[in-house]
Image (cartoon, rainbow, N blue to C red):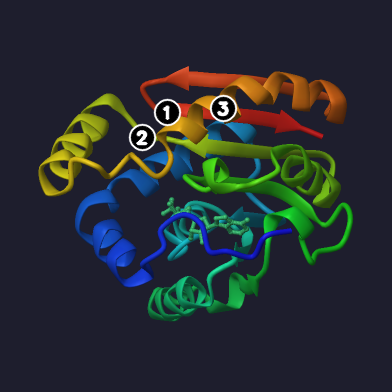
Amino acid sequence: MQKENRGATNPQRFDTIVREIFAPIYPVIAQQIINKTGVQSGKCLDVGCGTGALGRSIAKHSDLHVTYFDQSVEMMMLTMDYAKEENLILRSDFLVGDVHELNLKDASMDLVISRGSSPFWVDWKRAYGEILRVLKVGGKAYIGGGFGNAELREHIVKTMNKNNPDWRNSFKDKVVLEREALPSIMLSLQPSHFSIIDDESGYWIYITK
Ligand SMILES: C[S@@+](CC[C@H](N)C(=O)[O-])C[C@H]1O[C@@H](n2cnc3c(N)ncnc32)[C@H](O)[C@@H]1O
């Protein structure tokens, strides 16, 4: 499996973008995830957590214990700093690794979330297979990308386009390929349920094991 760092290759710059531009989306998405899945306690895994913004929002909106997971050590150091600052450390675990070989036990998670990471995964069938492996039976996954709602999306896209017109180039083709691949991947992995959410909140796959 390739170990090249993919997605947000400059953690400091990504952290600045998250703090200065993306910040308002995470509480909105966290609430959407909780409303949709109904999962508010137990164990949550945030795959490709970056600086942990979504997982930290989920922790603040629920009683969930969050395992922050990313392949980048630098991202994980930033996530740890923020979790400490925000008094979340007692409900946090931090794990560096690759989604294609999750170093986690079978059936150990109630909820798996991931935002903005899956287009960078090199083998979606294997990655989604790993996510299903670590979910408990009846556990939920909410994976995809988006900016919360139409108003936030419009503001963020405008700001990002102004700062760097090429900002989507590293992932836009992969987003299309992943969407095309998902139905047959789900057919072969056979979760008990999956559906696609494609609306102003973004594009997400919602899975029940
Ligand atoms: C665009 S960032 C999104 C970060 C965060 N989820 C957010 O919404 O702010 C993508 C993250 O996915 C991580 N990532 C990409 N491929 C990965 C893999 N195979 N395993 C684990 N993490 C991965 C990157 O290191 C990066 O932190």
Instruction: Choose the circle earlier in sequence order: 2 or 1.
Output: 2
Circle 3/circle 2 CB separation < 8 Å:
no
The residue pinned by badge 1 equals 202
Which is in the foreground here, disc 3 or disc 2?
3
Location of residue 109 in the rendering, given as x and y in whole percent from the top left corner = 77, 53
- What residue is drawn where x is 63% and y is 36%? 38
The answer to whether residue 34 is left or right of residue 169 is: right
The residue pinned by badge 3 equals 177
Instruction: Choose the circle earlier in sequence order: 1 or 3.
Output: 3
Q: How far apart are marks 1 and 3 (CA)?
A: 16 Å
Residue type (three-letter) at the residue carrying disc 2: Gly
The residue pinned by badge 2 equals 148
Residue type (three-letter) at the residue carrying disc 3: Leu
Along the viewing direction, whichever of 60 and 10 lies nearer the viewer: 10
Location of residue 29 in the rendering, given as x and y in whole percent from the top left corner = 43, 40
Identify the secondary structure beneath mark 2. loop
Residue type (three-letter) at the residue carrying disc 1: Gly
Which is in the foreground here, disc 1 or disc 3?
3
Q: Distance between the residues labelled 3 and 2?
A: 22 Å
Q: Is residue 183 above or below residue 96?
A: above
- What residue is drawn where x is 71% and y is 19%? 183
Give residue 57's quadrant in the image: bottom left
Circle 2/circle 1 CB separation < 8 Å:
yes
Q: Is residue 74 above or below residue 186?
A: below
